[in-house]
Amino acid sequence: TGPLPPQHTWVSPQNRPAGLFPTIRVYFSKWFVHPFKRRLAKYYLLLLKRLFSLRVIGITGSFGKTTTKETIAAVLSVKYKVLKTIDSQNTPVAIAKSILFQLKFSHQVFVVEMGAYNRGEIAQICRLVKPQIGVLTGINAQHLDLFGSLDNTQATKYELIQSLPKNGLAVFNLDNDLSLKLYQKTRPPKIGYHQSSHQAAILIGEHFHIPPKQAQIALANLPTTRLKQVKFKDTLILN
């Protein structure tokens, strides 16, 4: 799966367990167990792609990744058997686990949420899953403490688009200024969406030959993840 970023080859002092054997166990997992799982997952996924034409959709951005993943999976489930990564588990190790323990021969689409704490991590996930479609939900200053600058954030998120094959489809949120700039510099095939992740899901559904009306019905039945305001006596509670 390629070389690991530096943060994956050592354990920070605050995360080092006390005692010799717990320390050995942590380093053994980082250096041997996790890389082995990623490599095994990579070749299993490659097998499914070649034998069963499995399609992979990658989703990244500073915000909206999980919501976009849920909406896309809901629309594609109208016609296909879809597996999506669980909740916000978007690290290489978590994605490898999803591949090894959840992905079956019967799945036709794998929707993958991709997170990153440093440059190179999105590229690492892409080497693992090799997406044919990449969705960039938007970029902001939310993770400046991790990336140091917006330029680094942009470069990290754009690793998904750069990993796509020549005939891969890049999908951008055009309401986000930084995402729009990346859209403008990207060669086709590419599409852009406005307003919400629902439009992104409908557009990708059309790419998979799902009529917009069917997509809208699927989205209407999707449970909302937004917090509800509940007033109890004189207190406003977010539930």
Image (cartoon, rainbow, N blue to C red):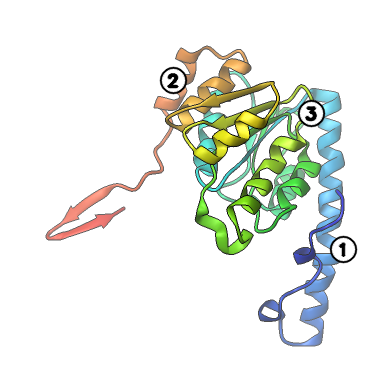
Q: Element type at marker 1?
A: helix
Badge 2 is on which residue? 216
Q: CA distance from mark 1 to mark 3?
A: 30 Å
Mark 1 or mark 2: whose residue is earlier in sequence: 1
Badge 1 is on which residue? 32
Residue type at mark 3 is Pro
Mark 1 or mark 3: whose residue is earlier in sequence: 1
Dot 3 crowding, Cα within 10 Å, few <14, some 14–19, many 20+: few
Dot 2 crowding, Cα within 10 Å, few <14, some 14–19, many 20+: some
Q: Is residue 77 left or right of residue 57?
A: left
Residue 187: name its quadrant.
top right
Image marks 1 and 3: residues in contact by CB distance under 8 Å: no
Residue type at mark 1 is Phe
Q: Element type at marker 3?
A: loop
Q: Nearer the viewer, residue 145 or 27?
A: 145
Badge 3 is on which residue? 165
The label nearer to you, 3 versus 2, is 3
Q: Nearer the viewer, residue 178 or 173?
A: 178
Q: CA distance from mark 1 to mark 2?
A: 45 Å
Q: Is residue 10 visible?
A: yes
Q: Nearer the viewer, residue 48 or 200?
A: 200
Residue 177 coordinates in the image, percent (x, y)? 50, 38
Residue at figure coordinates x 83%, y 78% from the top left: 24
Q: Establish if 61 lies above or below 36.
A: above
